[in-house]
Amino acid sequence: MEENHKPATSSSFKKGDDKEESSEVEKPEKETKSEQPQSQDIDDKEKEERAGIKHTLQKSYDDIETFLSKLENDAEAPDIPDFVHKYVDLVEKKLSKHEPLFHDDGSFLKVVDQISRLYKHLSDSDKAPLINRIGQIQQQAMCYLEDEFRSLLEEPDLKQEVVADQHGEDQSTLDQSKEESNFSGYSYQVIPKLNKIVKEMIFGGYESECCEAYMVTRRNIIDETLNKLGYEKISIDEAQKMQWEALEKNIPPWIKAFKQCTKVYFSNECRLVETVFSGYPSLSTNLFSNIVRGVFLQLLNFVEAVATIKRSTEKLFKFLDIYDTLRDNLSSLDGVLPKWAEELRNEMTTTRCRIGEMAIFIFCDLENAIKSDTEKTPVPGGAVHPLTRYTMNYLKYACDEYKETIEKVFKDHSKIERANSTNKPRSYEGDSEKNKYDDENQSPFVGQVLRILDLLDSALEAKSKLYKDIALSCIFMMNNGRYMLQKIKSSAEIHQAMKDTWCRKTSSDLRNYHQTYKRETWMKLLGCLNVEGLNVNGKVVKPVLKERFKSFNAMFDDIHRTQSLWVVNDKQLQSELRVSISAIVIPAYRSFLARFSGYLDPGRQTEKYIKFQPEDIETFIDDLFDGNSGSMSRKKP
């Protein structure tokens, strides 16, 4: 459009006549009383002139319509009567004052329609000056329409419902209004106006301007709507420079925006464009395609950006959230996008596959996290290793919250998983006894979990050798094995996946560690209560007896002092250990004491060599595995 024909904005249409006129009449610097009546006369004259133009335009409408009928029906164009020139003059004068033609009664569109028809049917005549004038008037009128079109689109109008409610409108009327406006965000009065403007602009040859105005405005509105959901555009370059914590915060808004677009916005946008461009199916299809394609690719670009960042295990669950969103909303998208949107479907599938592949790589990286933990400092007290806590909580959360999704991802991309994890767990190798849970029908995901558990078990076994005390290494393995076992049993999903095989094997290992612990500690203590060598020729040798009591006291004191510092956090395991220790030590000590204490002289000898009563032993055993400094202060009187 030529710049010299650019009209005033549509807001100027809505100014009152008096206010508009007052702005056009230039007031003198010093206004006297004698000049005020003259100004009033000008206002009245202008109002009369406007009224006259309006009346004349309305009166000329039928004449012009009759003339247009002749132009449309006669093979030869009739002579142009004078009232056509006058009509053009009136319309031009009206537009030059930046006023709407007949306000909101629809007459403006009728006049524009007449101007467009005049220009169309006279374009082949020899009336060049008149044709040029009509063309310029039409261009100016179309500029007004385009501005009004943008203005209506830029302000979704639901205010009328509030106003109606304040004025006590019938509730059924309000409900109907809301129902008709909900899908688009515009009131039911605005949609017909938009449609009429579309038809007039297209008829007048301004199709491209109309479509451009619609597409740009609606795209901006959708962008603003997504921004209100917290979604921000992030390019691949920006994503790669962002810290994960900052990028992670943008994922929930993206998920919300994607769901809203596929389930609500796109379908509403489709209905809106089909309604506004009713009668022009090809245009509405192209507009919807361009608008949706731009928004959709923008949303997918965010996912592509996330997929390019450096992977690490803590990012897995956000990747799975994205994967779930893409997978679950594909059906919603199918209901909205027609056949021409095959490209978008393919883009979405490709992006989903890329996220799925990344999720598998991240999950399999848990193996690398275990292998890379080369810490050589043993955990104090044989407690649960941080690696065990991290791995088991990671697996538990993955299975409890994402098992279905992860299994789906592994099923779709199992080749990637196998290529990334080449080391089979020990339980997959060797004889059939060790191969109990090698099931050809198990899912790739379960197989990966088993590999991770087996790798963790191997890592813990290596770390247990960092302890010089074999008994403490057994406590370490029991602590970690029990922690792993409890985590699996507490998760119905992962427990079901393991099919009890892993649990039975781990429980068996725990029993073996328990037996080794008792053998390395308490069975050695019982050696002090051995009766061999105490009797010589039927008599108890007191020095040997005293040495036995002395050795027992020293060893038990050392065990108590040392193992009180050891840690067993699992109360059940702690209780099992204490009960089993008591069952070994107390009966043997009680028997030995009852049999040989009488051979010591009462008084100082008894106090010197018999430091513990059976009840004291039980009390001190209850001190074990609390992680506290060992002390004999709790000895019973």
Image (spheres, rainbow, N blue to C red):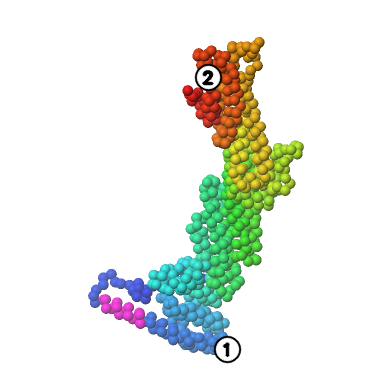
Where does residue 125 sit, x and y in percent of width and height?
A: 55, 83
Q: Nearer the viewer, residue 321 or 402?
A: 402
What is the magenta range? Answer: 35-48
Which label was assigned to residue 121? none
Residue closest to the eye, 298 or 560:
560
- Circle 2 crowding by C-alpha within 10 Å: few under 14, some 14–19, many from 20: some
Residue 115, placed above or below residue 339: below
Total marks drawn? 2
Would you place residue 444 above or below residue 460 in this image? below
Q: Is residue 84 magenta?
A: no
- Relative side of 414 to 325, left or right: right
Q: Amino acid at mark 2?
A: Lys
Q: Which residue is mark 1?
A: 74
Q: CA distance from mark 1 to mark 2?
A: 132 Å
Indicate whether 520 appears above or below 410.
above
Residue toward you, 581 or 477? 581
Q: Secondary structure at mark 2?
A: loop
Task: Mark yes or no: residue 432 visible.
Answer: yes
Q: Is label 1 in a helix, a strand or a loop?
A: loop
Pick the front one: 277 or 131: 277
Give the label, 1 or 2, closer to the camera: 2
What is the three-letter code of the residue carrying label 1? Asp
Q: Residue at position x 56%, y 52% from top?
A: 235
Residue denoted by label 2: 611
Residue 46 belongs to magenta span: yes
Which residue is at the far right? 431
Q: Residues within 10 Å of mark 1 (few under 14, many from 20)?
A: few
Residue 76 x/y as whole percent: 58, 88
- Residue at horizontal 54 percent and vertical 49 percent from the top: 248
| Picture quadrant of residue 277 | bottom right
